């Protein structure tokens, strides 16, 4: 029997990229057969985690897709419907998990777009999940510990 494959889609704005980044990185390492897509709403071309995402794309070029959407000031919670449709239509995995995180207007707008496409909390192929804030705190604590160890080694 063949293992199930998954496509994890993270949809976030700049207020939540730090949380989403660590979880999408975990999903990339979890299984090479899984795909991960990030739809990232940014205010301008110089955005948080730009270099980190570029490096991840280079390391996981067959697994990771990153779509940056520049937010128009008139529509601060808007992601182009076509971007979401492209990701869903190109899916080749057995199941899709979609995580949404950001300011309230942003998440509301994205959920409306998904509902328009017929995607609710779970409809067989697609399941919505929470991008967990606690996961980020764990990664930050580990990174801080590693920095402290490195500083201690450098002092000796």
Image: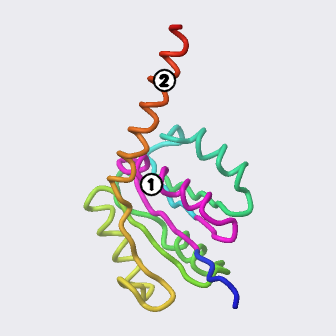
Scheme of image coloration: rainbow
Q: Is residue 54 above or below residue 29?
A: above
Q: Is residue 120 left or right of residue 49?
A: left
**C-alpha span from label 1 to label 2:** 26 Å
Q: Residue at x 69, y 71 (%)?
A: 33
Instruction: Tell me the quarter of the image containing the N terminus.
Output: bottom right
What is the x, y in percent for residue 14? Answer: 40, 48
What is the x, y in percent for residue 145? Answer: 43, 31
Q: Which residue does the numbered mark 2 point to in the structure image? A: 149
Q: Is residue 73 left or right of residue 39?
A: left
Q: Is residue 1 left or right of residue 149?
A: right
Q: Magenta part of the protein: which range?
A: 7-36
Front residue (pair 38, 138): 138
What is the x, y in percent for residue 29? Answer: 62, 57
Q: Which residue does the numbered mark 1 point to in the structure image? A: 20
Q: Residue at x 63, y 78 (%)?
A: 5
Asked which secondary structure carries label 1, the reply is: helix
Foreground mark, 1 or 2, reads 2
């Amino acid at each position: 029997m063949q293992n199930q494959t998954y496509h994890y889609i993270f949809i976030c704005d700049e207020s939540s990229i730090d949380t989403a980044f660590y979880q999408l990185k975990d999903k990339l390492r979890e299984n090479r057969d899984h795909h991960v897509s990030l739809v990232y709403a940014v205010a301008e071309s110089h955005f948080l985690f730009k270099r980190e995402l570029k490096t991840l794309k280079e390391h996981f070029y067959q697994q990771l897709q990153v779509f940056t959407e520049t937010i128009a000031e008139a529509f601060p919670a808007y992601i182009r419907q076509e971007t979401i449709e492209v990701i869903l239509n190109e899916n080749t995995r057995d199941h899709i998990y979609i995580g949404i995180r950001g300011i309230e207007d942003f998440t509301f707008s994205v959920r409306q777009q998904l509902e328009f496409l017929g995607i609710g909390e779970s409809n067989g192929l697609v399941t919505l999940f929470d991008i967990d804030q606690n996961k980020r705190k764990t990664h930050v604590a580990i990174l801080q510990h590693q920095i402290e160890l490195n500083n201690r080694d450098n002092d000796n």
